[in-house]
Image (cartoon, rainbow, N blue to C red):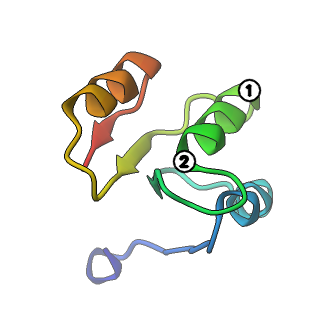
Amino acid sequence: LRSIGARLITASNGQEATEKVLTDYPTLIISDLNMPDMDGSQFFDWLRAQPTFAGTPFVCLSSVADEMEKLAAFDRGVEDYW
């Protein structure tokens, strides 16, 4: 992503991600579903509850190949699931 000029901001967990969202105003979020302190689903819910970030595109990452989890993520409004 850096090779195409994207600025990357990383967080170690969902709680840290909320803090970075509030200071860095991302235009796209790619989030693991399995994170400590606040998992990716909780982070997604928090993001959607914030008027400023409710429309920010959100992509889920997961190492678990669970079709039901993937369908549930799309039902909740994520843009993609990797």
Question: Where's residue 43, x and y in %?
Answer: 64, 44
Q: Which residue appears at 34% of the width and 34% of the height? A: 79
Q: Residue furthest top?
A: 75
Q: Tell me which label, 1 or 2, sits earlier in the chain.
A: 2
Q: Which residue appears at 74% of the width and 26% of the height? A: 49
Q: Tell me if residue 3 comes above or below residue 59 in the rendering.
A: below
Quarter of the image where one finds residue 3: bottom left
Label 1, secondary structure: give it. helix
Quarter of the image where one finds residue 58: top left
| Label 2: how many Cα within 10 Å (few below 14, some 14–19, many 20+) | many
CA distance for labels 1 and 2: 14 Å
Three-letter amino acid code at disc 1? Answer: Ala
Q: Is residue 53 visible?
A: no
Tally the marks. Answer: 2
State the residue in front, 27 or 39. 39
Numbered badge on residue 74: none
Q: Which residue is mark 2?
A: 40
Task: Locate the N terminus by quadrant.
Answer: bottom left
Q: Is residue 19 visible?
A: yes
| Label 1: how many Cα within 10 Å (few below 14, some 14–19, many 20+) | few
Left or right: residue 49 versus residue 72 is right
Label 2, secondary structure: give it. helix
Question: Where's residue 64, x and y in %?
Answer: 27, 51
Q: Which residue is mark 1?
A: 49
Left or right: residue 15 versus residue 41 is right
Left or right: residue 24 versus residue 3 is right
Q: Tell me if residue 3 comes above or below residue 72 in the rendering.
A: below
State the residue in front, 62 or 16. 62
Three-letter amino acid code at disc 2? Answer: Gly
Tag nearer the camera, 1 or 2: 2
Q: Which residue appears at 65% of the width and 29% of the height? A: 48
